[in-house]
Image (cartoon, grey):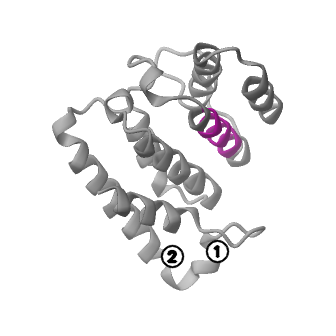
């Protein structure tokens, strides 16, 4: 269902506002606020699919057109789940963070000031390095079993280039 929603949005949305409204729906499922009636009972596979769908839609729109109010705290949320024991969730979070940083609109995704964006990137890079060093001898387990692709490693490389 998530894949269908994402594809229909990708091909059917007439503008970035429509895409962003679907992203907001996904975000409310990914990260239900404290005032939300949604209770997190999703499997790791469903959470991974939601994060991947959200990331895909983020990739399709111009970051400058995003609303400031919808995405505050996204960087904090994704960096917190980098420590997840589930490799798929961690990989999805890495990909989402890389796309957020690539958008060059960090102020829309973080409650921190522009001056602390460099610090924010440094903190996430340290977190990814730590994650990769923990799985250093178990490198195969941190790769996608279908492709051999290691999202954490690629995200780290990407973020280091951005700095």
Quadrant holding the C terminus: bottom left
Query: SS for tag 1?
Result: helix
Q: What stretch of residues is rendered in magenta?
A: 47-57
Q: Position of residue 115 (x, y in %)?
A: 16, 39
The front one of 44 and 123 is 123
Q: Please identify the quarter of the rendering in which residue 128 is found.
A: bottom left
How dense is the environment of label 2, judged by Cα within 10 Å: few (below 14), some, or many (20 and up)? few
Which residue does the image show at 57% across and 27% down from the upper left? 27
Task: From the viewer's perspective, tell me whether residue 81 is left or right of residue 48.
Answer: left
In the rendered image, residue 150 lying in the magenta stretch gets the answer: no
Q: Main secondary structure of the magenta part?
A: helix
| Disc number placed over residue 126 in the picture, else none | none
Which residue does the image show at 78% across and 20% down from the upper left? 12
| Residues at marks 1 and 2 touching, judged by CB atoms closer than 8 Å | yes
* Residue placed under numbered mark 1 in the picture: 141
| Disc number placed over residue 135 in the picture, else none | 2
Which residue does the image show at 46% across and 20% down from the upper left? 65
| Total marks in image | 2
Q: Position of residue 116 (x, y in %)?
A: 19, 41
Which one is earlier in the sequence, the residue at label 1 or at label 2?
2
């Amino acid at each position: 269902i998530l894949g269908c929603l994402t594809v229909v949005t990708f091909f059917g949305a007439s503008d970035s506002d429509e895409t962003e409204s679907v992203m907001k729906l996904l975000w409310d499922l990914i990260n239900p606020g404290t005032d939300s009636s949604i209770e997190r009972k999703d499997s790791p596979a469903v959470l991974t699919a939601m994060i991947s769908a959200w990331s895909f839609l983020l990739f399709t729109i111009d970051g400058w057109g995003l609303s400031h109010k919808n995405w505050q705290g996204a960087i904090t949320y994704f960096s917190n789940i980098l420590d997840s024991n589930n490799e798929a969730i961690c990989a999805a979070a890495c990909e989402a963070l890389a796309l957020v940083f690539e958008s060059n609109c960090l102020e829309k995704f973080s409650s921190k000031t522009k001056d602390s964006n460099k610090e924010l990137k440094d903190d996430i890079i340290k977190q990814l390095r730590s994650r990769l060093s923990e799985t250093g001898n178990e490198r195969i387990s941190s790769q996608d079993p279908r492709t051999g692709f290691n999202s954490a490693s690629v995200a780290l490389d990407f973020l280091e280039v951005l700095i």
